[in-house]
Image: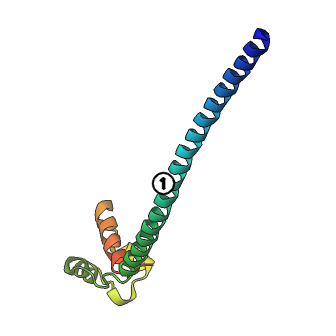
Amino acid sequence: MNDELTQTVERLAATAALLEQAAARLDERQSIDRIVATVESRESELEAKLAAAEQKIAQLEASATAGRKTLPAATQNLLAKQGVAVESIEAGALDAALTSLSMEQRFAVKAQLLRAGLLG
């Protein structure tokens, strides 16, 4: 009888240990579920922010294409002295007109023409 009682007590102890392990796993699972829920709610918030940022980028790109269509006076004077008409700039004529300038000055003039939308 003592052996049976001892075996029963040992089985009950083993069962209690298994129940404690199951409870610990359940607690871990619940904390994981809370983390997942937090991440999912944050994900929708970030998606909304991304959509707003993409819209803002599209607006800025649209406004950038509608930029300046005139040249600074110094650039217009320089091109006029070289005989280049601003309304109809051709690549060959522009390169010929800018040969007397340094490389940096050529880049600056061409950058201004690009910004003004006169070069493509």
Numbered disc 1: secondary structure:
helix
Above/below status of 25 relative to 78? above
Above/below status of 23 relative to 5? below
Taking 17 as reference, is 67 left or right? left
Quadrant of res 27? top right
- Say which residue appears at 34% left-offset and 76% top-offset: 115
Crowd class of label 1 (few under 14; some 14 to 19; many from 20; radius 10 Å): few
Residue 102 seen by the camera = no
Point out residue 63 in the picture as x, y percentages from the top left corner.
Answer: 36, 80
- Say which residue appears at 60% left-offset and 36% top-offset: 23
Residue reaching furthest to the bottom: 87
Quadrant containing the N terminus is top right
Compare residues 92 and 16 and report the one nearer the observer. 16
Above/below status of 95 relative to 13? below
- Say which residue appears at 41% left-offset and 69% top-offset: 53
Amino acid at the residue labelled 1: Thr
Compare residues 71 and 59 and report the one nearer the observer. 59
Quadrant containing the C terminus is bottom left
